[in-house]
Amino acid sequence: MLSKKTVEKIANQNILISDLSDDELAEFCIIANQMYRDGKSIVSDQDYDFVFLAELAKRLPDHPFLQKLESENEGFSEEKVKLPERMLSTNKAYSWEEIQKWLERISKSCEEINLPLKDVQLKGTAKLDGFAGYDDGTKLYTRGDGNKGSDISRVFKRGLGVFNDSQRGQGAGEIVVKRSYFESHLSNHFEYPRNFQASLIKEKELNHFALDAITNKAALFVPFNQLPKWLGDIDTFTNNFENIVNELEAGVDFDIDGAVFEVINPELKTHMGSNRKFHRWQIAYKENKEKAQVKVLSVTAQVGRTGKITPVAELEPTLLSGATIYRATGHHYGLVKEQGLGSGSVVELTRSGLVIPKINKVLKPAEVDIPAQCPSCNAKLSWDSDFLMCLNHDSCPDQIIGKMVYFYKILANNDGFGQATIQKLYDKGIRQVSDIYLLKVTDLISMGFGEKTSQNLTEQLIRSRQESIEDWRFLAAFGVNRLGMGNCENLLKSYSLDQVFDLSVEDISNIDGFAELTAELIFKGLLSIKPQYDALVSEGFELEKTFLSKDASQSDGPFRNKKIVFTGSMSRPRTELEKQAKALGIVVSKSVSSKTDFLITGESVGQSKLKLANTNDVSILTEEEYLKILNTK
């Protein structure tokens, strides 16, 4: 358990995030979140989101803390009461790519309910950084855990006003303080607006700062429906996204934490629904805009698993987004030459929502040093366009280690085989992944691993062979050039895993999406990994087969191009049945409508879908009947 002193050191960056274990990072996030909810923030909201929480999500994406609704002000002593309406958190996006994924989910949902995408209307508002509450006109509640909150109606009795002098009872909103007022009257006494806002809510008697803010109408309850808003369709939203965000953020005099966008079509909102944590029809966009000008002390070369040499800029220690930055990637040596990235240069650095810092541009160039030899194996380096390459793929230590680390990273069904473990194995003579699977506990102990660690590692090796994984993921783990996970999946939709090693360049280039140059690189790559593939497969891996799309093209059964819905508990995972159906040219939907052709039922079927199926004259089949027709039982 972290001590109070250690928590303070982490918050003040005296202990770097890179030096924290996974458990320590998770514990700090929980503590920092609770302090924030209690109005005693120890780090800024931006640092919490973009530094600590982002790193936790990167290291432990399935950590329980990231899955649950963040409770509002649990530190308050009031007994919790049921809210008039459920108040969920808001799903967050930190990049345009994540916003695009949200739009794709909207598009998919539109298809399922036959709503034209052009008819979808979106609304945007600023995302306030205050205390969330719900005002039913009689009482004001904190959000609590989303279902139950605390009655804090006393804040209105103390004189707290409603934004725009509007009426009470407008539902969800936030208690906030005007940004301009905080900066001019309170910033010398409170580190963050959140810390001041807490004083408005807690049971103790108000201090003069709070009374003055209420009197001056600087502290307010702002119903969300009173905020300035943007309304428009998806095309307008996509084409003007940055301007829309900037206008929303500039439109209010409150501390903000991004912008919130939501669907306003009632039928689409109902269909998209929510999970336990947030509404699927709503998303918050948060951007980290902090930048810094940093002096480069030196540039060192690092070797990746493919032989690509990456320049790494060693920086003058700089505090950025709550963390001290010592180094950043220089992308490639073409940029080093072109922009003058060298010792003594000055660069513009951002984090842009990422834990790893990014060099935007070189502001002041300097003399550059381009290495002639590989820093790992001393082989002569070669240029490939903008990239400096080490072509000693079979003997370069860093490339060999990188390939083994990559295999376990992509496999993603084991623990313990990270950089440090693989480096230690390499130092003891291990050169390929198949050799790792031959190791026993006694072998690992003799290599210097502890007895318990050795036992854990061997158990993880057994687990990685016995735990089911997709065949395309297994193939991708070998790191063949141009065969990432997406291309592997597309390849295995056309040919089985056993067939791909016998394909010609022409066979590969004839697959939709594979150009001739890509096909040539894949062909060579597959030949190079064949011995290692055979060695690993002989050890036995539980591979989940990709359904071949050519089976769909040959299918002329009753389900070809038909729209089906699965419901109830099936004999095997629903996702597996849906994958199989799509591979056979069947359209799979989540809801029953007049355009549904078949409802496939398992055990414990809900009556609503059966009723809809009967109303819309949809054919109903049991899972057994469906599989029998497919001849796959």
Image (cartoon, helix red, strand yellow):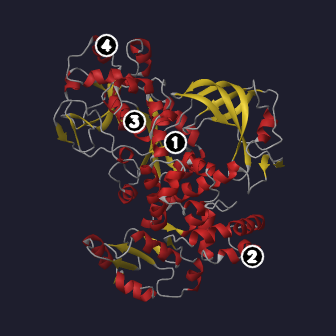
Tell me: 422 left or right of 171. Answer: right
Label whose residue precedes the other's in the sequence (2 or 4) = 4
Q: Secondary structure at mark 2?
A: loop
Query: For the residues marked 3 and 1, what is the alpha-carbon distance in whole angstroms?
Result: 18 Å
Label whose residue precedes the other's in the sequence (4 or 3) = 3
Question: Measured along the vertical axis of the image, is residue 123 above or below residue 44?
Answer: below
What amino acid type is highlighted by mark number 3?
Answer: Cys
Name the spot of residue 59 as percent of width and height, x first: 48, 45
Q: Which residue is mark 3?
A: 29
Q: Secondary structure at mark 1?
A: loop
What amino acid type is highlighted by mark number 4?
Answer: Phe
Question: Measured along the vertical axis of the image, is residue 12 above or below residue 495?
Answer: above
Label whose residue precedes the other's in the sequence (4 or 1) = 1
Instruction: Please tell me which residue is depicted at 54% across the width and 62% down the height of the picture.
Output: 437
Question: 481 or 145: nearer the eye?
Answer: 481
Query: For the residues marked 4 and 1, what is the alpha-carbon distance in whole angstroms?
Result: 35 Å
Q: Which residue is mark 2?
A: 504
Q: Which residue is mark 4?
A: 209
